[in-house]
Amino acid sequence: MVTTEGGDLLQITRPLKRTDQKAQNAKRITDLTEFARKASPEEIAIALLKRERRTEIKERHERKNGKFGILNEYAYEEDLKNIFQVLIPSQESFKEKKEIFQKVNIIRFDMKMLNYFNSLTQGHSAGDAYKKSMADIIKGETIGMKEWIKAEGLDYNSYLVGGDEFAIITITDSEKVKRLADKIQFEIAKMPVPEDSLINGWVDYGIANLAENVDEFNRIESSYRFTDGLDGKRERLLKLQDGLADRRADLSKFLERINYLGKLLKDNPDLLDKIYSFATKGAIQISLTELETLMIDRTPEVAIKEWVKNILSQRDNSAKKRMVDPFQQESINFYSKMTENFLHV
């Protein structure tokens, strides 16, 4: 956690209590073994669901993902809310261009093809190890990162906010934020991975700064009569900020991964069936024809950008159809416009 330029704004995490639970764990294992021996499949399934729910509640309370040793998505949401409450104490704050607004930055990271790693190479245990190594780098706990962060005078909080997504909140200059994201990306690229995994360590990232969104936010707000007061207004600005960082990470991810898949298929054409199954699911969603095009020759960058634009456009249109909240719809319009400007297609 960080406290240099950001002052006390990031002093909002609570350390976990550590207790010796060896005896409790041993009893729990005995009880679970006995339960599994006697219970029906339906009872076991219900018990597992209840356990997942208890884990979710426990993580919400503790603010940390125990498996990967990093702050969780509940901590991320809570910390952003706390920072916004400090920075935006009144309605007038939204119209003031405070200098501190320039220093509030979110970085969103997206792991390279975790689903591919889990499904097509080493399995989930290797995928977890891959993710844990990334978490240690993003937290700044490796030797290289610790020394670099100290030299830069940086401080930040890091979080696991999804299955393959990390985030950082930092209060510092934009130039330092970009250097931090680049350094993390560089360190992850050096991660050792099994030779037969066919992928290297990589994360894509996107950065959003509070100040750059204020004008767009005020424009959207002025178009509607929201009745949920200052707290609701802060919440909407938080979502716009986080969504913009996430969209920028997506753009980087799509462009990098489509190019990567093309190289992978040229070198390993026998993987087409496996890659096709992976590439048409989830976030990438490119067709068999497009994959075959990537295999045959070097696809022009403009064509890849057009694919990315179409993928995100379809996703945005689908999301807008599901939404009734006008602010969310306007936010998606904003992200779509930003996407077109970024891709220049």
Image (cartoon, grey):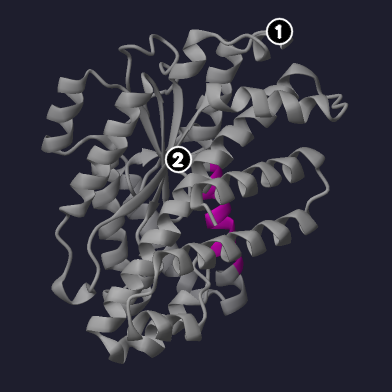
Give the residues drawn in magenta, as a range: 46-57
For the N terminus, which image quadrant? top left
Q: Which mark is residue 304?
A: none
Decide which of 281, 210 is in the foreground and name it: 210
Decide which of 109, 143 is in the foreground and name it: 109
- Using the rendered image of the protein, determine whether residue 235 is visible from the camera's viewpoint: no
* Residue 197 spot, x, y in % from top left: 23, 73
Determine which residue is flagged by label 1.
92
Q: Main secondary structure of the magenta part?
A: helix
* Residue 163 spot, x, y in % from top left: 45, 56
Image quadrant assignment for residue 238: top right
Q: Is residue 79 above or below residue 160?
A: above
Magenta stretch contains residue 20: no
Q: Secondary structure at mark 1?
A: helix
Mark 2 Cα within 10 Å, few/some/many (few <14, many 20+)? many
Image quadrant assignment for residue 125: bottom left
Residue type marked 2:
Asn
Q: Nearer the viewer, mark 2 or mark 1?
A: 1
What residue is shown at x 81% (from left), y 24% (from top)? 222
* Residue 49 spot, x, y in % from top left: 58, 61
Q: Is residue 217 left or right of residue 113?
A: right
| Of pointers 2 and 1, the one earlier in the residue sequence | 2
Determine which residue is flagged by label 2.
72
Decide which of 320, 34 is in the foreground and name it: 320
For the C terminus, which image quadrant? bottom right
Contact (Cβ within 8 Å) of mark 2 with mark 1:
no
Q: Secondary structure at mark 2?
A: loop
What residue is shown at x 71% (from left), y 7% (from top)? 92
